Image (cartoon, rainbow, N blue to C red):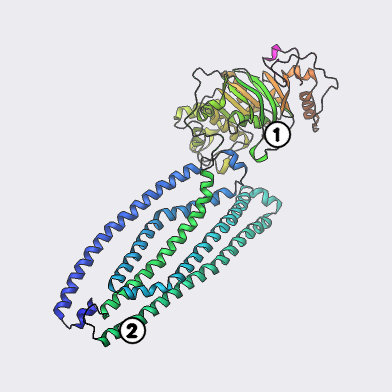
């Protein structure tokens, strides 16, 4: 339009046109500021909310899923996938709408200015589409390869850093570095391969745009020359209409280039979302976040395991329990012993409902735990593992982790009950002392006592001790064992103790021997020693330092003197005093 007015040599018309256009552009700029700010803010806020939902849903994955994945690979892959998704649903989503509408509106104006001239640009459209598709496909394939290899590299780094002292003592740093570099090199190779394809697609698209420019200029010259030669008087091609069409086509091309970048980001996000939502959409066998399930009003704490069969999802063919049955009275202290690998820790996981049995049932006060609310069930159970896991942060934070919202008095009371208050008070920072990565700043006994404090702060009804003292030295073991004995004596807790060192079972009211996925012996310490079975063999082996291979202290064992409940093989009911002799099934 400016060119057409300039051709008229009318300064007044030109000035008027410039003034009106400037006012229009200023107004348009103000509207763009408001709309652009609002659009980006809204898309960012909406995207952040979606990311929060996705993160929360992803973190709800059950232990069965983690069993089949390398824990070292998960953080790296998760961070990379979340970054790709976040970029796509926040900034890139807004840019996609902007560039898409900008390209379409530019083409519409170009068509209005000169439809036939704008149509010439469609000649290059197939090449533009082909180049764009090639770029998107190459970027998507590269993202998958990069995610896989960088995740594996992250797993190597995670393992190396986590065992830095072991690596240094074994002089294996070069081996870890070589493994890390191999995965990084594989990721770089995939990136380089995709870079060639992306570059070729970009070159094809750029070439197509240049061809479009050439075609439109040649057509414009021919059309203007023809109209002048024919003496056109109406709807003629002018310099203004030609430049309007050319400028709009150029703007559409620029918008298309930005649009392709948005599409590439969306393609990467699509590949990342496929991995993320494969986890989110998986229905867990045990939903710890479900609000469904009952709660026992008058809780006593009696446990019964009835004909339980179980195998881990990642090793479905390997049966851990094959008809395990056991009854634990409310307030009773029961020890589980047996050869290594026979499922003692697995029983603790079943009671906590980290997994569900494939057959049979586990009951709490006569109610199948599958019918109970999972969060409530885990809240009334305290658990202390063999290797205490402390979180990065202060001692206060770690103890309070067992009872969200715990008051200072509750934290100190739990620490005193766990015999931890004294050594905590000796630290300059007291309860604000940082425990370090996984409790690296504390000794084994100190970490174990903090784990006990974390378990008992919620005043559980059932206490599960999974070899809670096996990793400690003798002095620390005696101190921690004294704490556990005092806790059991102070409150009528139903306690299940898994013991590798059989001396820690001496204060338990009954001892159950798990062998071959079943309870084979059940009774008091004295009864089991007199019986001369697996427990006796384990005790003798620990005294001599020898290994146990499912042997017995005495060769002759009969079943005729054993009182077995009529409910079926492998189940023993009642207390130890009700048994004539321990059970060996």
**Helix, strand, or loop for circle 1?**
loop
Q: Is residue 546 above or below residue 304?
A: below
Q: Quadrant of residue 105?
A: bottom left
Answer with left or right where residue 138 lies relative to residue 513.
left
**Residue 572 falls within the magenta-colored stretch:** yes
Query: Does dot 2 land on a helix, a strand or a loop?
Result: helix
Q: Tell me the tag on residue 335.
A: none
Towards the viewer: 504 or 509: 509
Residue 189 appears in the rendering: yes
Q: 116 or 373: nearer the eye?
A: 116
Across and down, in percent, residue 134 comes to 51, 66
The answer for how far apart the CA atoms under marks 2 and 1 are is: 84 Å
Relative to 263, does residue 75 appear above or below in the rendering? above
Residue beneath disc 1: 319
x, y percentage for residue 414? Answer: 52, 27
Residue 476 is at least partly visible in this image: no
Is 331 left, or right, of 251 in this rendering? right
In which quarter of the view is residue 468 placed?
top right
Residue pointed to by mark 2: 222
Q: Is residue 468 above or below residue 154?
A: above
**Which residue does the image show at 38% across and 74% down from the upper left?**
121
Q: Earlier in the sequence, mark 2 or mark 1?
A: 2
Rendered-image quadrant of the C terminus: top right
In the image, the segment drawn in magenta is: 561-580
Q: Could you tell whether 159 is left or right of 236 in the image?
A: right
Q: Position of residue 135 (x, y in %)?
A: 50, 65
């Amino acid at each position: 339009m400016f060119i057409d007015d300039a051709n008229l040599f009318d300064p007044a018309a030109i000035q008027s046109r410039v003034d009106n256009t400037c006012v229009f552009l200023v107004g348009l700029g103000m509207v763009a500021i408001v709309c652009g700010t609002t659009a980006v803010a809204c898309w960012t806020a909406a995207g952040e909310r979606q990311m929060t939902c996705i993160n929360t849903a992803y973190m709800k994955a059950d232990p069965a899923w983690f069993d089949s994945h390398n824990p070292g690979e998960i953080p790296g892959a998760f961070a990379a996938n979340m970054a790709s998704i976040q970029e796509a649903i926040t900034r890139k989503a807004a840019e996609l709408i902007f560039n898409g509408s900008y390209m379409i509106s530019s083409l519409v104006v170009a068509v209005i200015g000169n439809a036939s001239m704008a149509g010439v640009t469609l000649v290059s459209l197939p090449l533009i589409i082909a180049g764009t598709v090639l770029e998107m496909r190459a970027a998507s394939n590269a993202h998958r390869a990069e995610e896989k290899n960088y995740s594996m590299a992250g797993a190597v780094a995670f393992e190396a850093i986590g065992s830095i002292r072991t690596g240094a003592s074994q002089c294996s740093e070069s081996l870890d570095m070589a493994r890390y570099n191999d995965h990084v090199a594989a990721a770089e190779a995939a990136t380089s391969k995709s870079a060639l394809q992306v570059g070729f697609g970009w070159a094809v698209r750029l070439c197509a745009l240049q061809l479009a420019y050439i075609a439109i200029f040649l057509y414009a010259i021919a059309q203007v020359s023809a109209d002048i030669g024919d003496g056109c008087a109406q709807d003629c091609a002018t310099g203004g209409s030609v430049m309007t069409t050319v400028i709009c086509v150029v703007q559409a091309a620029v918008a298309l280039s930005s649009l392709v970048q948005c599409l590439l980001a969306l393609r990467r996000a699509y590949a990342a979302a496929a991995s993320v939502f494969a986890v989110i959409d998986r229905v867990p066998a045990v939903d710890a976040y479900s609000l469904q399930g009952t709660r026992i009003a008058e809780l006593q704490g009696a446990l019964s395991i009835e004909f339980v069969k179980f195998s881990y999802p990642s090793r479905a063919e390997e049966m851990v329990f094959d008809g395990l049955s056991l009854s634990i009275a409310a307030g009773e202290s029961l020890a589980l012993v047996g050869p290594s690998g026979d499922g003692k820790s697995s029983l603790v996981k079943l009671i906590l409902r980290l997994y569900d049995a494939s057959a049979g049932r586990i009951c709490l006060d006569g109610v199948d735990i599958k019918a109970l609310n999972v969060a409530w069930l885990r809240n009334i159970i305290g658990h202390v593992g063999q290797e205490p896991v402390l979180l990065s942060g202060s001692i206060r934070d770690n103890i309070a982790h067992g009872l969200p919202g715990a008051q200072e008095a509750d934290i100190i009371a739990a620490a005193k009950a766990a015999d931890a208050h004294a050594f905590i008070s000796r630290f300059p920072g007291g309860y604000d002392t940082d425990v370090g990565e996984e409790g690296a700043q504390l000794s084994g006994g100190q970490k174990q006592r903090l784990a006990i404090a974390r378990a008992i702060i919620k005043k559980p009804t059932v206490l599960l001790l999974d070899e809670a003292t096996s990793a400690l030295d003798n002095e620390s073991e005696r101190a921690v064992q004294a704490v556990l004995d005092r806790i059991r004596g102070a409150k009528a807790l139903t306690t299940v103790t898994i013991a590798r060192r059989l001396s820690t079972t001496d204060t338990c009211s009954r001892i159950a021997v798990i062998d071959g996925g079943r309870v084979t012996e059940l009774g008091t310490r004295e009864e089991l020693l007199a019986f001369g079975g697996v427990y006796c063999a384990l005790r003798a082996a620990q005294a001599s330092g020898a290994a146990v291979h499912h042997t017995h202290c005495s060769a002759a064992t009969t079943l005729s003197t054993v009182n077995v409940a009529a409910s079926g093989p492998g189940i023993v009911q009642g207390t130890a005093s009700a048994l004539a002799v321990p059970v060996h099934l």
